[in-house]
Image: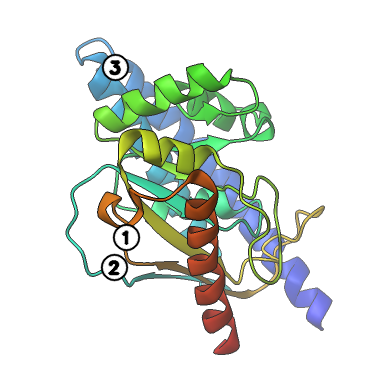
Amino acid sequence: MKNFKIYSLNLYFYFLFIIYSLIFIPAVTLILGSCSLFKSSRCRLRRCRRAISWYGKGTTLIPFPFIRLIYENHSDDNIPEPYIFVCNHRSASDAFLMSVLPHEAVQVVNIWPFRIPVLGFFARKAGYLNIRKMRPEDFFEKAMGLLRERVSIIFFPEGTRRPHGKPGHFHGAAFRLALKSKATIVPLCISGNENIPPRGSLLLRPGTIRIRRLPAVTWTDYGEMTIFSLKNRVREIIGNELSLMESRA
C-alpha cells in the first residue's frame, strides 16, 4: 500500500510537471524575448530571475497536498537588501525551494544544474554563479557586482547534500564574500525534504518541508570575526535550529 501511494504520487507529479513545463517555459521564453527588444539589460535580468522564481513556486505547488511546503520567517528585522543567504543542503529539490524568498536573487551552484536541459540555460541567462568553473577572483568580482545591484546571493556552503543531522563542513566562499562586502547574512534552515527525492533517486515521497528564515547576522555582529570563526558561527546557528525543528517534528 505504501509503495502504491508513492508511485501514484510520482505519476501524478511528473505528469503535471511535464504539462506545466511545456506550457510555462515556452510562454515565458516568448515574453522575455519580446521584452528584450525594449528593456535594458538590468531589467531583462530582473525579469528572468523573477520567471525562475515563478517556475519554482509552481513546481512546489504541484504535489500539494501530498507534499506540503511551509515557509516560516523568524526574522524580526527590517534590514535593507541585498542579503547573503546561507542554507543547509538536504536534497536536489533545495534549489526549487528558494522560490519562497521574496527577493531578486541568484544561486551559487555546482556544475550539474547547468547541465539540466532548458533550466540550465535559464540559470546561465539569470546570472547564476558556477563556483566550480570560475576563478576565485572572477567569482568575487561578479558576486560583488550583484550585491551592488541589490541582488541577493544564495549559498549552499556544504557543497554536497547531507540528508540528516547537523550541517557538514562549510566552505568559506560565502563568508569571504560577506567580509569583503559587509552584506547582511541570513541563515536558512531546510528540513523534511531528505526523501523528496532521496539522493540517487527521482522518486518523491509524501511529507512536509519546512524552510525557516532565521534572524539576520549583520556586519555589526560579525565585522571582527575571521572567515573561519564566522562560518563556524553560522553553521552552529543553522545546526542548533535544525535540531530544534526536527525534535518537534
**Residue 176 coordinates in the image, percent (x, y):** 47, 37
Frontmost residue, 74 versus 180: 180
Of mark 3 and mark 2, the one earlier in the sequence is 3
Label 2 packing within 10 angstroms: few (<14), some (14-19), many (20+) = some
Label 1 packing within 10 angstroms: few (<14), some (14-19), many (20+) = many
Label 3 packing within 10 angstroms: few (<14), some (14-19), many (20+) = few
236 sits left or right of 197 in the view: left
Q: In 3D space, how far apart are the residues under numbered discs 2 and 1 (Cα atoms)?
A: 7 Å
**Residue 144 coordinates in the image, percent (x, y):** 35, 27
**Residue 84 coordinates in the image, percent (x, y):** 38, 45
Report helix, strand or loop for mark 1: loop
Amino acid type at circle 1 is: Ala
Amino acid type at circle 3 is: Ser
Residue located 56% across and 64% down the image = 63
Per the rendering, the mark at residue 135 is none
Per the rendering, the mark at residue 75 is 2
